[in-house]
Image (cartoon, helix red, strand yellow):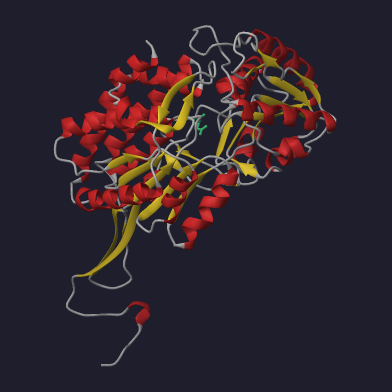
Amino acid sequence: MNIAELLGALGVDAAASAGPDLTVRSPIDGGRIAQLREHSAAQANAAIDAAHGAFLAWRQVPAARRGELVRLLGDELRANKQALGRLVSVEAGKILAEGAGEVQEMIDICDFAVGLSRQLYGLTIASERPGHRMMETWHPLGVVGVISAFNFPVAVWSWNTALAIVCGDAVVWKPSEKTPLAALACQALFERALKKFGDAPEGLSQVLIGGREIGQALADHHRVALLSATGSTRMGREVGPRVAARFGRSLLELGGNNAIIVAPSADLDMAARGILFGAVGTAGQRCTSTRRLIVHRSVAGDLLARLEKAYAGARIGNPLDAETLVGPLIDRVAFDGMQAALRQARAEGGKVSGGERRLAGQYPEAWYVAPALVEMPAQTEVVRHETFAPILYVMRYDDFAGALRLQNEVPQGLSSAVFTNDLREAEWFMSASGSDCGIANVNIGTSGAEIGGAFGGEKETGGGRESGSDAWKAYMRRATNTVNYSRELPLAQGIQFGG
Ligand code: UN1
């Protein structure tokens, strides 16, 4: 299927979005796949106002009925899993299995949100006063702005939207300028679901194509009650304070610098497989990608030999070919960033294997690379930075406390993992004095989280939590209700006030 057929099958009216402003290229060969019109800041503000109007009506619809819309969206995603997954592969460059996997995450969060639509529960709390009852009620919040990155061009929208819709909110989405077609496809599928649903208000979910000005409109507009932003720490540093300045809420999911610790008792075969998926999968362009390996000195040689073999066998190439494991980097900027990091690693004493450009003859306008394994003498400056590319820095450790120190001594705190069969090490790793990340795994890698858990991390990762567990609470406002069913009016804290 060519791109026009793919968009057609997904219900995208390509002509309606065509325009001179934004050239969309496929990282597979660098070729142009679309030319789109961008929205202006004024259009963004109008979209936010319209979404607010939709919210005022939507919040009155019973939550279980709101869940029905998400159920219908899940049906559309099931029916179009392969087509949407393929579009993600074409536009973001991830391999077909990962494109389809990303759509599966969307289906999963829809299922989760449909169940949630019959919960959205609050607590009842013992009152200190006789004849009184205290409780919490969760109400819809308002307009949720979503800013997403190229690397998960559809799933991140769905984590936010599935929850926001059942929570009674409206959504305005600014996708990455690198992956607008996938966003238009999501919007088209959402509109199909809306048609089947019937009576939803106009403007409940909208997409804005464009760059900085759109992000700024979402950050600054007082009607965006929550801005959920996924991307670099640099972006978060800009967006977070702007939203805070107007006392808006933000949910930030920023950079990761995820490590795997491999202990002497580890199953090295399993560890090698987990590291390969984490470091090389999605060409190292997940926020959860494994970027650091902290391996016990006694097993380092054995593990590295396995990894070198696995790296040599990982096929680099067109992500649409079934045998490919490593697709291209998103663009030249990513390639240059990777080369700069490797130069810095060498200057800091690193021993680099891999990292060079591949397939330049076949795809002169695309940026394929051999994943790099870099043995570092210490956790130097370059290791402390997130480079969005398949670079795995390898460091050795002697005692577990030292390994934990290395793991935590970076500015980011998203995901982490340990491979060990030692119960003490595993529990220590997950304890208060263990990993300081939002995700701490045992005997699985750092990437590929299920949607049922809360997703996000600490420190420069931004502190937000999306997706499962009680992440829905960020999309609602909490009211504490105290009800007096007695005939007296006792004051709290025993205060006597007048007669
Ligand atoms: C991201 O890279 O922004 O845990 C999200 C994972 C995926 C999500 C990654 N479920 O790797």
Residue closest to the eye, 116 or 212: 212
Residue 29: % across, % down: 54, 15
**Image quarter hosting the C terminus:** bottom left
Residue 403 seen in the current view: no
Tell which of 17 and 349 is nearer to you.
17
Q: Residue furthest left?
A: 198
Above-or-below relation of 411 to 259: below
Residue 65 x/y as whole percent: 18, 40
Against 42, residue 77 (above or below) is above
Q: Position of residue 256 (x, y in %)?
A: 60, 37
Q: Quadrant of residue 345?
A: top right
- At x 55%, y 45%, the residue is 235
- Give me the residue at 67% from left, 22% from top: 266
User: Residue at 49% across / 7% down in the picture?
Assistant: 322
- Is 405 on the left or on the right of 91, as rendered? right
Image position of 304 with respect to 250: above or below: above
- Is 255 or 115 nearer to us in this picture? 255
Q: Quadrant of the N terminus?
A: top left
Q: Return the x and y of residue 398 as percentages of the image width and height.
A: 80, 32
Residue 497, by quadrant, is bottom left
